Image (spheres, rainbow, N blue to C red):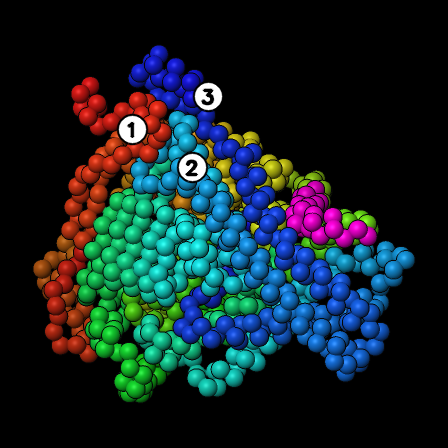
Amino acid sequence: MSEDSEDNNSSNQNEVLKEDVNLQYHLYILIFAGIFYSSWVIPGICFFVYLLQFFLPNVLETANILFVFTKVKPLLTFLIMPLVLIGCYLLHLFLLGLVTKLFWIFTEKMSPSKSGIIPRNIRSRAANYYHIRSFMIKYGKNAFTKGALPWLSNWFFNFVGSNKIGKGTTLEESLVNDKFVEIGSNCYLGVNSSLASHLVQGIFGNISYFKINVGNNVTSSAMTQIGPGSEVHDNSYFLPLASTSKHSIIKGNNYYWGIPLRKIFRKKIMEYLDVSPQYLERNENIEGYKDKELLTKLKAKEISKTISENISVNENLISESDEETIDISNLSKDELSLDFTTSSAISRVNIKFLAVYLPIFWVAGLIVSIFWYWYLLYENWIPILAFLPLAIFGSIYFFIVACILFCKLFLILVNLIHKPKEGIFKAEIGDKDFEFWMLRTELKKIALWFMRNSPLPWTDVFALKLFGIEMDSSSHLNDAWCDVEFIKFGRKNLIGQGASIMSSMVVGKYLIIKKVVCDDYIMVGGLSTIAPGTIMGKESVIGALSSTTVNQVLESLWVYFGFPAIKLKENKYGEERRDVILKRDVDKAKKFEMEHEVNIDEDKKDLIKIEKEIEKS
Amino acid sequence: MSVPNTMRVGPFTPTILARKRYLIFYFFLIWASIIPLLLEFWIYWQLLWSYSRPVHFYTYLPLLAFLMYVTIVFAAIFFTKILLLIINVIHKPREGVFLRIPADRDYRYWSLRNTIKRWPVWLAHRFPFPGILDNICFKMFGVKTKISNSLFEGWVDTEFIDFGKDVVVGQGAIVQSAVIIGNLLIIRKTIIEEGVRIGSHSIIMPGTHIGHNCILAANSVTTVGQELEKGWIYVGIPAKKFKKNYFFEDGLEEKLGHVEDVEALRKKYEEIYTKRYDELTYKERKELKKEKKEKEKKRFDLEEYDDYEDGFNI
């Protein structure tokens, strides 16, 4: 393969390499299998042994419930059972960390992770091991941060060696934060704050992979985005949705917010946080307030004040209630145009749907229980215990596949009764289109929910295809929130983490359903929102944290950014492969250039144009 | 549609541990809530198990699994509620600005409350049937909400929040009643009235009061204690009045249009943020400044200012 690309390049120097970017899951899956198997086999054996040796004879076989509670042995077995479950879970987590660490060390030896731009369209060892590492950390990361004991995730990252996290730091659930980040102590990173050490620019472009350094006592409340190569120094406080681009330097000892990031003044922060200066003073001199007695004294003074304030606020609420009538015919076009984007969350929870859920759950579960019946039929315990992780994995996927098939069956029936169609409908009970839209969404949700929570979330492409997205499996959207009808994808699209692609949108009383069309090689940045009716041309890019408006058309080969997304620059990431990066000093609002080394194998260095050569030509 | 694994922003309690010993409560809750489960399984085993012909046992097993999951959630809610009542008697949860250090009693108890609430909320949020169990959790732990509200696609804090009827929280949106900024922990009551639509990826800070039939567009942020007037559409960071909301009127199906010139819209949008100050006459400007000064004096009881720049924000 590498020879091919070299030939191409030598024959035509100016042409950009647009070799297909293959995600080599077939190889990575072996690593996943190793991690999965070895993390489940020992806990599984422990649990089974306890279940069969102690719990079954002592508790389940006891016919009289009174004996369970009056005799010592059954009672103990009964009460220890939950502890065994917790213990097995902890053991699973530990083994998960251990095995991931072994694989991590191996990949680091083969190709150490270092800061630099990795070309995405040239096959190289650096790119390959970068992908392997990103893939294998995902299972452990999700198991820890989304598991029952998220407090252990710091241990996991430190133990594996993907991140360095200091003492007393709390990382909330997030989209990335999983590798090449160094965080100091006593930090708090709120929900969805992502320290993205890697960033993909264009399908044929580069992967920016730079280390992020975060100092001590840095806090961010929610959804802060920090780009690769950033340096965040001590005592930087981010307000929600503060986001910086690549290579930002944040000096610290201040509050920051906005897109792009900027520091804000004392006065403004008081307005935004609605706090008095005395609290800001406390924030700065936190060391002086680490005394319990002092704090209780201070608080006693403040309590009486806050209570009186609260009452006055409540009176305000009651007083504003006056109705006015609006004449629809007088409304102007401007007032009724959909020049903003909202969400597509289903507007009410309905217990009725349990009628659909239970049968699907039961029938799919039946297949799993038949499987287990067959599995436990052979009384030879050694293979049963040895293949236990496989059986767990198998039963998860039997269940999911059965779920998908039955959901699809229901879906066909539902669509026969009422054909899904585009248009603007009333989002109220009683409107047929709206009710069937909800039913369809809920039906698909069961199967997709299971699939996306399974150990291999990217398999959801098959479910999405089956449920009605026109796409092939070369696109990657398992990290995105995506409606599953009226969407068309071309080839090799990359949808960023947490982006939402909506073919339906609830605005006030109305539900808007409109087809979203994406051509080939699209990129959508993380946390951006695609409104219904958006048409994206070939090789267009939408930056992170942007949103399109209804029926917006994005031209091909352009990069769009902002609310609403407008043209930012041409998509030339395929051509640009520079060894010069632009650093940004946030506090002084200055930019300066720095050189770095492109991260690619030695024998492929000649494929890359460096800055000096570009100047020469 | 289904929220991806990487973005599922529940369970809705911060993972801060002010003291490591709070985990003892957590483990106790896990232990206690599994006990009823085992009893249930014992009954099922006694009823349906037979060594020679376990057909019935395996047939109804999925239904039992469903039931057991619901049982463990309710058991967890029950034990947590009892624990929570005891903790709240020792230290009443209250609003205010606190410090993010373990010496601060309010911070400690806030962390403890979140730690013990995590187990039931986590369980409820892992359940494939969306919303119902989440909403029951919210109701039990002191969030005023209707069962029919859909709050499960985003992050919603579990105390000091009031929801009206028919509220939609968009995918990935964050509704907070407590926020950590620097060394401060700000807890304020958030009130969201009837018929509010919150766009995807938008953030609502503590103390926000959203009037009814308001729309907060996608990717917007409110400030602490901001009041959003009823019947308006708000947009931006921080959220600003965009236009009046007529989308709750009947009979607009034919009339809703889309934007043709997006760049003009962007300009209009940026105007909301940049105009206000320069377009006013000198007199008006002076009055505005005076008004603002008085307002802040009232709010903060302060006499003098430091350097202050009225920079715009987008």
In the displayed structure, does residue A574 sit left or right of residue A395? Answer: left
Q: Nearer the viewer, residue A107 or A607?
A: A107
User: Is residue A386 in view?
Assistant: yes
> Which residue in the protein does label 2 denote?
A110
> Around disc 3, counting alpha carbons within 10 Å, would you say few (fewer than 14), some (14 to 19), or many (20 or more)?
few
- Between circles 1 and 3, the one closer to the viewer is 3
Chain letter behind tag 1: A
Q: Residue A132 carries which label?
A: none
Label 3: state its secondary structure: loop
Residue at the far top: name it.
A11
Residue at horizontal 29 percent and vertical 36 percent from the top: A568
Q: Which chain carries label 2?
A: A
In the image, what residue type sits under mark 2?
Answer: Met
The percent position of residue B162, horizontal first and vertical second, equals: 46, 71
Instruction: Write the start and end of the magenta stretch as one range.
Output: A379-405
Tags 1 and 2 both on a single chain: yes
Vertical position of residue B313 compared to residue A581: above or below: below
Disc 2 packing (10 Å; few <14; some 14–19; many ≥20): few
Mark 3–mark 2 CB contact (< 8 Å): no
Nearest to N terminus: mark 3 or mark 2? 3
What is the crowding at mark 1: few (fewer than 14 residues within 10 Å), some, or many (at least 20)?
some
Between the C-alphas of marks 3 and 2, the distance is 20 Å
Give the residue number, with chain letter if any, for mark 1: A576
Residue appearing at x 58%, y 44% in the figure:
A34
Q: What residue is pinned by disc 3?
A: A1
Foreground: disc 1 or disc 2:
2
Task: Residue at the far right: name it.
Answer: B52
- Relative depth, front residue between A365 and A529: A365
* Residue B269 spot, x, y in % from top left: 29, 48
